[in-house]
Image (cartoon, rainbow, N blue to C red):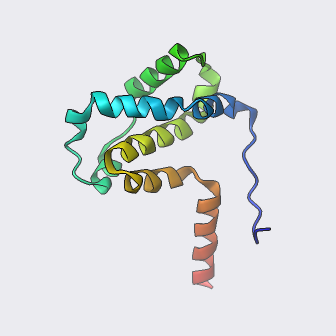
Amino acid sequence: MPDVFIPLDKNENLVYFNKLNREDLIYSYAFNYVDNNRGKLSRFENVEEFNKDFSITPVILNELIAFAEENGVPKNAEGVSFAKNKIEILLKAYIGRNLFDDEGFYPIYLAMDSAFNKSIQILREDLVQ
């Protein structure tokens, strides 16, 4: 049992995000996006530059939603709105992984990992004391 309990987010509004994730649609779209945009993405020389200067635009997000619909996950405007930040972070992390392997994934992905972020918070508090 961990020293600090961090509950899973079981919010019903995450159903759409969970479907995208469970069906590997975010990962698949990210793979296709990198494959189709490799020339444009080659301007990023390292992970830091990618993380700082690349963002998920509304066009990219809408393409992902259309891709999901084509693959059996109907658009859910409320679910997209609620989980937009999580979708964008995971999509950017997968694009980063395709460009820079795990070094491009974890620094981005961990931004939405509640257990990791709580651990960092506790460690910082311990350092201050």
Residue 14 placed where, x, y %?
Answer: 67, 34
| Position above or below: 84 against 103 | above
- Indicate the position of residue 120 as horizontal and vertical percent values: 58, 68
Please give left or right for residue 24 compared with residue 39 in the image.
right
Residue located 48% across and 35% down the image: 27
Examine the rendered structure and indicate whether residue 91 appears above or below residue 63. below
The picture quadrant where one finds residue 103 is bottom left
58, above or below 44, in the image = above
In which quadrant of the rendered image does the N terminus lie?
bottom right
* Residue farthest to the bottom, as pictured: 129
Nearer to us in this view, 64 or 120: 64
Placement of 3 over or under 81, stated as above or below: below
Estimate the x, y position of residue 58 in percent, counting from the top left: 41, 26
Q: Is residue 58 left or right of residue 24?
A: left
**Residue 56 on image: x %, y %:** 40, 35
Picture residue at 59% right of the left edge, 53% below the top: 113
Residue at 54% across, 34% down: 84
Q: Quadrant of residue 71?
A: top right
